[in-house]
Image (spheres, rainbow, N blue to C red):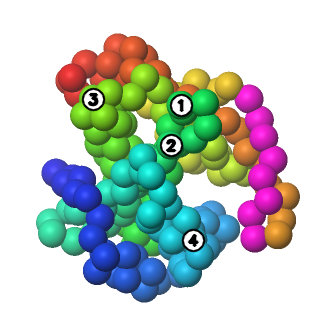
Amino acid sequence: MIDLLPIKTEDVAEIKNWPVYDDGFAQMDYAMREQGWLDEFWHRPDTWIYVAKFNQQIVGFSLLGSMPEGKTEFRIAIHPHWTGKGLGKRVTIAALKAGLGQFNLDQIHLIVRRTNHRTAKLYKNLGFSTIGESNHIIQGKSIEFTDMVMTKENFYNLHPEED
């Protein structure tokens, strides 16, 4: 079972010391380091950051952050030693359940790199809908993304056991 718990200061230090990603996730390594996602979102209002624990070990983290126009953005990172073991799906469902249920959000947005086919497939299988494409500057490089959204209605229609 995955436990999703509010992040603590000591958790941030542990995450920043995770080993480096390799293979298909190497481009995401910056997200866990200094000036990465945790530093970017740590003090942002209306942002919820959680660690995902499995057997008392931090295996990932997720965040839900407010965006303009009342939208909420979702991000997730899985410990490099735990990728490819199904935890991304479990952590994503737990985070969506928190955001759409506990925080009563109507929809949650995300962007996924167009080259990250495995993760895009996961999001589609969970019920995210593609709503467009965008380009963002990440570490000085222009990166192409697919923009996706999960509505509360769609989530609970596809995952009634999460109600």
Which residue has dot 2 on it? Answer: 66
Residues marked 2 and 3 touching at CB (< 8 Å): no
Which residue has dot 4 on it? Answer: 36
CA distance separating discs 1 and 3: 16 Å
Looking at the image, residue 151 sits to the left or right of residue 142; the answer is left
At horizontal 37% and vertical 57% (from top left) the residue drawn is 49
Magenta range is 132-139
- Give the structural element (helix, strand or loop) at label 3: helix
Which residue has dot 3 on it? Answer: 101
CA distance separating discs 1 and 4: 23 Å
- Give the structural element (helix, strand or loop) at label 4: loop
At horizontal 43% and vertical 23% (from top left) the residue drawn is 106
The amino acid beneath tag 3 is Gly
The amino acid beneath tag 1 is Gly
**Can you tell which of label 1 and label 4 is closer to the viewer?**
1
Which residue has dot 1 on it? Answer: 70
Using a 10 Å C-alpha cutoff, classify the residue at mark 1 as few (fewer than 14 neighbours), some (14 to 19) or many (20 or more).
few
- Give the structural element (helix, strand or loop) at label 1: helix
Image quarter hosting the C terminus:
top left
**Can you tell which of label 1 and label 3 is closer to the viewer?**
1
List x then y, in percent, for residue 44. 48, 57
